[in-house]
Image (spheres, rainbow, N blue to C red):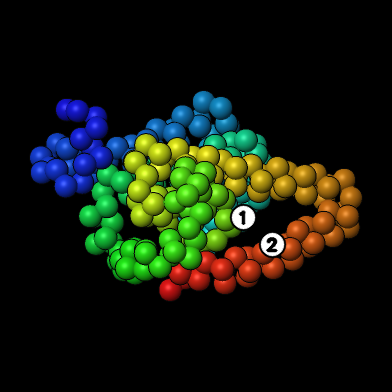
Amino acid sequence: MDGSSLFRPTEAKTLPLTLVRLFLPVLLAFAYFFGSFLILPPDKSLILGGLMMVYYIPPAGKESIIPLGIGLGIPWWVMVISLALLDVITSLFMILNFGLALRIPVLGPWISRFLSSGDAFMQNHPWLSRWSVLGVAFFVLLPLQGTGGVGATIVGMIAGLSPAKILLAIGIGATAECLVFALGSELIWRLILENLYLGLGVASAVISAGVVLYLVLRRRFSELHQ
């Protein structure tokens, strides 16, 4: 089986190819989870697995899952790798099973609405296609619902990126975003442990700034919430 054939959605699919498309991303996620037992205590790996599942339940996102994971004792770098990898795996699932994704309740209609406004979206944000991989990576970096593995994959497709470039862009953007949240969370947790009032003050300021940034970006990228 030619590996490149996995990325040809119009190709007539045999049952084995369909099963590979469907289960490969899932198997990668499970392989990572079970591999975490090699570097984390069993209880921490179980917590990590739970957080990985919660990550797929809106409105949970990196901005909430990463601080929670660090607060529960999971190293910041493990949280970075875990959530960035989940975005890449989600993108891989979308690329391999786009037709199936369109039939998933809630997700499918959202994808269809996004695709129907694709031309207008790219006209409003021409830098996405102009910057190519970096444009999609920056899109992933935005702290908004819809800029993760699913939304970024669609944007990459609209921008004309190849599957490999889409995965690269999402890997870059997700890693950068996770690093921002992880290092910031690690710093705030340390401040709280050393000086409760200072830590809470910094946390409140960061949260307030984050809310303002979120509202501004949400208005700027209103297409994601239609």
Foreground residue among 100 and 82: 100
Q: How far apart, in angstroms, are the residues tagged by discs 2 and 1?
A: 9 Å
* Disc 1 element: helix
Which residue is found at the position 40% from the left and 68% from the top? 120
* For residue 204, above or below residue 19: below
- Which x, y percent locates residue 72? 65, 46
Q: Quadrant of residue 26?
A: top left
Please say if the residues under marks 2 and 1 sit with CB atoms less than 8 Å apart.
Answer: yes
At label 1, counting other C-alpha atoms closer than 10 Å, the crowd grade (few under 14, some 14-19, many 20 or more) is some
Residue linked to disc 2: 210
* Disc 2 element: helix
- Which x, y percent locates residue 148? 47, 53
Residue linked to disc 1: 63
* For residue 183, above or below residue 37: below
Left or right: where does residue 221 sit relative to residue 26? right
Q: In the image, what residue type sits under mark 1? A: Glu
Q: In the image, what residue type sits under mark 2? A: Gly
Left or right: where does residue 190 sit relative to residue 47? right
Foreground residue among 23 and 128: 128
Q: Quadrant of the C terminus?
A: bottom left
